[in-house]
Amino acid sequence: MTSLKQCQLLRDSLAHIGKKIIFQSRVKEEPAYYCNECELEVFNILFVTSENSSRKSYIVHCEDCARQRSPSLPNVVILEQYKMEDLMQVYDHLTLAPQSGSSR
Ligand SMILES: [Zn+2]
């Protein structure tokens, strides 16, 4: 299951092997992404490979499948869709009572 802590650990481990994470905000009503191999929903951090750069076909993988292909992820671009602050806010709100006067 997805959790904020998992996202943080994942970011740390990626930073550790020298991978850059590119922030790319989700657009409104952008569909969820699913791993091309195991069909798991990929949340927040996408592992993207381009099979054929001239045709711009991009393939999304989950972490497990991406690492199975190559543990150091040499040809994988990592996209992050939410800012950590946003995620934290979401989680904060989840633990609060629904009617705590949010300013939105
Ligand atoms: Zn997968």
Image (spheres, rainbow, N blue to C red):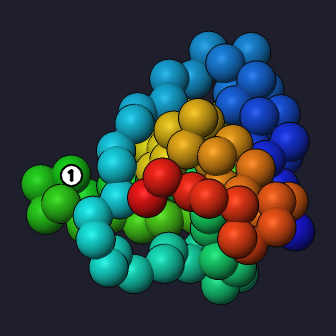
Depth check, front residue: 48 or 93: 93
Tell me if residue 36 can be seen. Answer: no
Q: Which residue is drawn at the image coordinates 49% and 65% (left, top)?
A: 60
- Disc 1 crowd, CA 10 A, few/some/many (<14, 14-19, 20+): few
Amino acid at the residue labelled 1: Ser
Residue at the disc numbered 1: 53
Would you place residue 102 above or below residue 84 in this image?
Answer: below
Quadrant assignment, res 57: bottom left
Point 70% across, 71% down: residue: 99
Q: Is residue 33 visible to the viewer in this orientation of the structure?
A: yes
Q: Give the total number of marks visible in the rendering.
A: 1
Tell me if 100 is positioned left or right of 49 in this view: right
Camera-nearest residue between 64 and 101: 101
> Where is residue 85 drawn, in percent x and y?
58, 35
Q: Nearer the viewer, residue 82 or 39?
A: 82
CB at mark 1 closer than 8 A to ligand 1? Answer: no
In the picture, which quadrant includes the N terminus? bottom right
Quarter-of-image position of residue 31 = bottom left
Is 46 left, or right, of 69 in this rendering?
left
**In the rendered image, the vertical position of residue 26 relative to residue 99, given as above or below:** above
The quarter of the displayed image where residue 65 is located:
bottom right
Q: Secondary structure at mark 1?
A: loop
Q: Quadrant of the C terminus?
A: bottom left
Left or right: 35, with 21 as reference point: right
- Residue 96, image x and y in percent? 82, 60
Position of residue 78 measured from the top left corner of the image (x, y, whole percent): 50, 41
Q: Residue at x 13, y 63 (%)?
A: 55
